[in-house]
Amino acid sequence: MAAFAYTIRDSSGRSSSGTLAADNAAEASATLRGQGAILLRLRPVPERRNTAPTRRTPWSALRCQPKSAPVEVSLKQIAVMLRSGLTLLETLRTVSEQSTSGRMRRTWDEVASAVRGGATLTSAMMSLNRFDRIVTELVQVGEQTGQLDVVLDRAADALERRRLLKAQMVSALLYPTIVLLAAVGVTVFILTYAIPRLTVYLKALGRPLPAMTQILVDVSDFLLTQWPVLLGPTVLGIVLFSVAYSAPIGRLAVDTVLLRIPLMGYILRTGATAALSRSLSLLLASGVSIVEALRTCQELHANRRLALILARSRERVMAGDPIAPTVKLPGGFMPMLASMVDAGERSGQLDRTLLECAVYHEQRLEALIRVLSSVIEIIVVVTVGGIVGYVYVAFMLALYGAAL
């Protein structure tokens, strides 16, 4: 029988903490909920060991940091082998031998070594600091409930969905950026390479240039003669932005501004809402308390503004507030999230309503990406076509005037 530290909130809204002895986390959770309390936090009380801590250099985690896809494959392999009756050590050794990634192989070797020394799988994975928080939380739940194979499948699916969602968002934001750079490159090439050579021919004719052609020539001359003046502030701006973004306050300010950009901000908020809804749904359905689930989701968000919203939400939930109002802040997650959370809290099926919210926003994000791709293609065709057309008409007018 193990000991569990808990934090609950009674029907009057008061919070209290304590410890409870139970065989596993599911039994402890059922006991507390049977008393009519709302479970805010439930954590096993770690046993004291006399083993000395392992000394690790700051570079060890960076050297062996595995990518998401190999981790997903490894977790699914472990789940299959555990269901087949293999022991945990045999499973870890087999996964390490079959891994095609050197980083993944070293990671599972270190996990197996820690488990062989008496550590739990959760503590071994946490000590390496190479796995996402959602993975270690689910693994801990699986060890406590005896359903490690089930939660490993869930963890692999969660990583896969998050990776695909991130790829969708990168695609949505990277595509217009690349297209914009290509359009700028074409424009610069025309103004700095093509036009100066055509200008030499036109000036040799000895005729005054039409106003439309003269404007184009003046712009080309300005870029050719003043490019150091334009390049200097651009480089300085990039350096200042990098320095500001590396500081916590600057990072928070930049992330806040990104969420408010009309199109980009809408895509970022939609993707973040989908990721939060699915992660919270998975953690709650697996038996993780709402406070720990919010803490885990907070660490998963790269946007500091959204992470700060989740941190404040967790603090207010621990103080006795409901969840829905804490995530309903302007410029943060999509408004539908708060409505779905409120409905889930009232019905007692928060994990299911969050899953529905995640599916809706994932579909919404896919639709946004399709629309954005179509709009960008039209804008690029019109822009590049307009530039090339302007150059063509300007020089045809000059040639026509010279021929008269």
Image (cartoon, grey):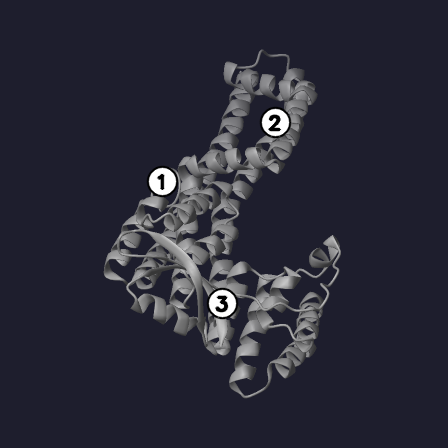
Q: CA distance from mark 2 to mark 3?
A: 58 Å
Q: CA distance from mark 1 to mark 3?
A: 29 Å
Number of residues whose C-alpha sits closer than 10 Å to that of mark 1, classed few (under 14), some (14–19) or many (20 or more):
few
Q: CA distance from mark 1 to mark 2?
A: 47 Å
- Is residue 105 visible in the rendered structure shown here? yes
Front label number (1 vs 2)? 1
Q: Residue at x 60, y 80 (%)?
A: 88
> Where is residue 56 drawn, in percent x and y?
74, 59
The label shown at residue 191 is 2
Residue 112 horizontal side relative to residue 332, left or right:
right
| Of pointers 2 and 3, the one earlier in the residue sequence | 3
| Of pointers 1 and 2, the one earlier in the residue sequence | 2
Q: Residue at x 40, y 70 (%)?
A: 28
Corner quadrant of residue 237: top right
Q: Residue furthest bottom?
A: 85
| Amino acid at dot 1 | Leu
> Where is residue 348 drawn, in percent x and y?
27, 62
- Is residue 200 visible in the rendered structure shown here? no
Q: Are marks 2 and 3 in contact (CB under 8 Å)?
A: no
Identify the residue under disc 3: 138
| Total labels drawn | 3
Answer above or below: position of 378 versus 47. above
| Of pointers 1 and 3, the one earlier in the residue sequence | 3
The label shown at residue 329 is 1
Q: Nearer the viewer, residue 50 or 142?
A: 50
The label shown at residue 289 is none
Q: Nearer the viewer, residue 300 or 225?
A: 300
Q: Nearer the viewer, residue 367 or 12?
A: 12
Residue 307 horizontal side relative to residue 115, left or right:
left
> Where is residue 277 drawn, in percent x and y?
38, 56
